[in-house]
Image (cartoon, grey):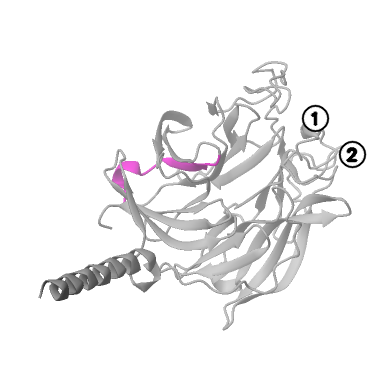
């Protein structure tokens, strides 16, 4: 009897262990990975909606709540809020996926429901280097979905990048004009003060790619007509503040000196003449932290957190956080919440500190949750909501 009972119990333990391992290893069979984190708004539930994305970069919500997500190597997918994802959509532009370059930001036209038009920002190869480019296309929602009528409407002019500092964030104004962030290409930082090219600039163009007649440098022989502001380093966040209507941006500093700026027509934001950081070698870069004729940031991070992506929160799922500004952090691997009083930053809360992921983009979803992209070879799409929602 004893050997038989012993064998029966051993088999039962093996079966139970196998079932437990199966439950742990099969999230696709009904289990969705979720983690919880503390915050000033209570416990946050962070759910993995999709994984296996290769360096996802940009996120845009379709009218029905599905998401368009770019992957830096040159793929665009549609992902549902349940995590179902399409095959890569045909019709995307050919990208130069080198260094920080590739298929980067995406934005829907303000009249997308009528015209199905979207914009993609990407690194475009030109000989031995790359430049930032912006393309317009129509989404054909399938089946299967694809991009159609792709047309490059803007190309950055100036010295080419070896693979760094493309900028590439897109924001559309209520009047339909497009703002595009253009990096300094790292090796050409002094060009951010040169109005004769597009490096280190924010440009303002029409949906056809032309310069509006009321841009600040129209008619100047030594200035590119598309320029709206200059003296930027590597802008990784760009959005209109829905409470004030102003255009805000966040850009990377070198070692220290990440900045939040409110953008004004024709203004100079100082890079590399003024700033709060130092070179990666430890050497001095800036003449000073302030200079007449150059704008001051409203928020600086020293040391750098490498902010990326931004969203002004307007929803009701987090009523305590309405009016806050959220940004991801790559180097610091955080989600940062900034409290605002008009045009002033009054406080900072650091969230998801133990997540251990580079957060590339932050968006408010139609459900009031915060949606994040993590920048990794096996990147994830995350939903952040109060526990129980």
Residue that numbered label 2 is attached to: 221
Residues drawn in magenta? 317-330
Is any atom of residue 254 visible in this view? yes
Q: Quadrant of residue 348?
A: top left
Estimate the spatial distance between the alpha carbons at disc 2 and disc 1, rounded to whole Å. 20 Å
Q: Is residue 315 above or below residue 331?
A: below
Residue extending farthest bottom: 143
Estimate how packed mark 2 is, as few (under 14), some (14 to 19) or many (20 or more) residues with alpha carbons within 10 Å. Answer: few
Please check the rendered image and state whether residue 59 is part of the magenta-colored stretch, yes or no: no
Position of 328 with respect to 251 (left or right) is left
Picture layout, residue 248 above or below residue 143? above
Q: Give the label, 2 or 1, closer to the camera.
A: 1
Q: Residue 287: horizontal and vertical position, in percent?
A: 73, 16
Quarter holding residue 228: top right
Say which residue appears at 74% left-offset and 52% top-offset: 98
> Disc 2 on helix, strand or loop?
loop
Give the residue pinned by disc 1.
190
Query: Is residue 263 visible in this depiction of the protein?
Result: no
**Which residue occupies the extreme top position in the image?**
288
């Amino acid at each position: 009897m004893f050997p038989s009972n012993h064998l029966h119990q051993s088999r039962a333990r093996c079966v139970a262990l196998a079932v437990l391992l199966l439950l742990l290893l099969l999230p696709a069979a009904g289990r969705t990975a979720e983690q919880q984190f503390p915050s000033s708004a209570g416990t946050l539930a962070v759910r993995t909606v999709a994984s296996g994305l290769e360096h996802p970069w940009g996120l845009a919500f379709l009218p029905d709540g599905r998401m368009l997500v770019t992957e830096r190597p040159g793929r665009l997918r549609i992902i549902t809020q349940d995590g179902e994802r399409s095959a890569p959509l045909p019709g995307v532009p050919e990208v130069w996926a080198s260094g920080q370059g590739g298929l980067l930001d995406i934005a829907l036209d303000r009249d997308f429901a009528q015209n199905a038009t979207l914009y993609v920002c990407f690194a475009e190869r030109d000989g031995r280097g790359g430049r930032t480019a912006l393309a317009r296309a129509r989404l054909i929602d399938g089946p299967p979905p694809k991009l159609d009528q792709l047309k490059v409407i803007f190309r950055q002019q100036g010295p080419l990048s070896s693979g760094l500092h493309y900028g590439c964030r897109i924001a559309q104004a209520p009047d339909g004009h497009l703002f595009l962030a253009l990096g300094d290409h790292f090796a050409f930082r002094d060009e951010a003060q040169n109005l004769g090219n597009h490096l280190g600039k924010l440009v303002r163009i029409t949906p056809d790619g032309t310069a509006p007649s009321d841009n600040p440098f129209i008619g100047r022989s030594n200035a590119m007509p598309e320029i709206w502001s200059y003296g930027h380093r590597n802008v990784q966040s760009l959005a209109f503040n829905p409470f004030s209507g102003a255009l805000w941006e966040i850009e990377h500093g070198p070692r220290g000196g990440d900045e939040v700026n409110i953008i004004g027509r024709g203004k100079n934001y100082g890079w590399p003449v003024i700033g709060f950081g130092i070179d990666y070698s430890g050497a001095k870069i800036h003449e000073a932290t302030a200079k007449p004729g150059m704008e001051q940031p409203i928020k600086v991070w020293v040391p750098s957190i490498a902010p990326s992506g931004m969203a002004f929160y307007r929803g009701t799922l987090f009523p305590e956080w309405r009016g806050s500004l959220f940004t991801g952090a790559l180097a610091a691997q955080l989600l940062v919440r900034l409290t605002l009083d008009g045009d002033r930053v009054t406080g900072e809360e650091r969230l998801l500190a133990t997540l251990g992921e580079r957060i590339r983009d932050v968006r408010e979803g139609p459900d009031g949750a915060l949606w994040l992209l993590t920048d990794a070879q096996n990147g994830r799409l995350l939903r952040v909501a109060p526990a129980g929602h």
